[in-house]
Image (cartoon, grey):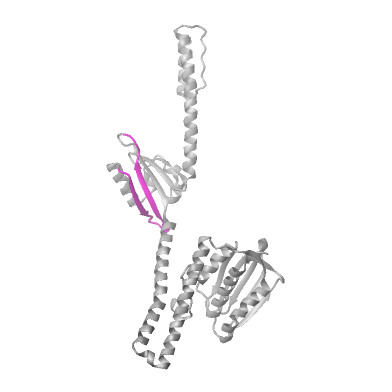
Amino acid sequence: RPLTILTNAAESIANGDYDQKLYFPQQDELGILAQSFNHMSREMAERVRQLQASGDRLSTVLEGMVEGVIAINERQHVLFANESAGRLLFFSPEAAEGKALFESVRNHQLQKSVTEVLKTLEPQRMEVELESTSDRILGVTTTPLPGTPCPGLVIVLFDMTELRRLESLRQEFVANVSHELKTPLSSIKAYTETLIRGAMDDPEINKTFLLRIEEQADRLHQLILDLISLASIESGNQVFDIISIELKPFVESCLVDQQKVAESKQIELIIEEKDPGIKVKADEEGLHQILGNLINNAIKYTPDQGRITIRWQLDKRNMVLLQVQDTGIGIEEKHLARLFERFFRVDKARSRELGGTGLGLSIVKHLVQSFKGTIGVNSKVGEGSTFSVRLPRG
């Protein structure tokens, strides 16, 4: 009977029931065996609990990772895949478990990497371009699992699309800065050389050339000021004095600065105050820069005898909607998404002719964000554009 009890308890433990306790009153060999059995049962139950807790923690960590993780065996069958891996490679981790990896993920570069690492047992890092409409670039690290023979691999995936986009923007920015600096410097150099070679003796020509040199120097100076301003805002080092500013007198003072340029093109500047006495929370100099850039742009791209309207009203969530609307040439819809990028110009030749640095709208966007606001634009070719700035109410 004791042996039958012992056998049944052992079978229960084999089936996963670790809460088995035996009690034999006799102190003979069976009694000692029962005590050892009870001790073993307790130890096994504790070890299993620890393993389950460790497994749960590991599972939580893996599922919470932004990086994708896939574990495969030596036959390239999926042992585990987290949700991030499924999202990055467009497959279902649950459905893929137990199946060959490349039944779920069809990518030649990844397959080649896995096969090579299983063969050489050397970790490998590479970049994979997904053959889909997503244009995603993934960084892939493939590492063999420890053991002889190798029991499989761990594949770690991380999305490098944004990193590559930023790298491309950086390169584009450097190229644009170089070009923008080179253009006025080349002009200054050419005019100076012409003057030195004899044009200085002609009063009419030398005055014209000196005016051109001054014009290009001003352009260069403005570009450098804009670059410094943008770098300061983006770094977060610029200190803003956020105060309540009443919009009507502030807008009127901004329009005074732009009045002369507007009159030269016979452009009418209109103020529409829907909610009198409204104030916004912003830095005074920063808000002047925002309005100045938007109104100046509107004047540049509005034909003669056009109209520019500055209006504001209370918006939802205690925000103030400030709009600058023009009757200008408008912007094609395909360009709107990139309008606030540094050095982006819809018409590069026209923009340079009008003296723009290509940084104005980028500065405006960063200033608005610094004041906890948002900016957007609506436009129709041939009918004009409306820039909408939302700022916290003062």
| Residue 151 percent location from the top left of the image | 34, 36
Placement of the C terminus among the 4 image quadrants: bottom right
The image shows residue 235, relative to residue 258, as above or below, that is above
- Considering only vertical position in the picture, is 243 above or below 35? below
The residue at the point 63 percent across, 70 percent down is 322
How many marks on residues? 0
**In this view, 66 is above or below 249:** above
Q: Residue at x 57, y 71 (%)?
A: 289
Residue 146 is a magenta residue: yes
The residues colored magenta run: 122-147
**Is 233 or 34 nearer to us in this picture?**
233
**Lateral position of residue 102 relative to residue 271, left or right:** left
Horizontal and vertical percent position of residue 31:
48, 9
- Nearer to me, 372 or 289: 289
Frontmost residue, 191 versus 234? 191
Q: Nearer the viewer, residue 158 or 245?
A: 245
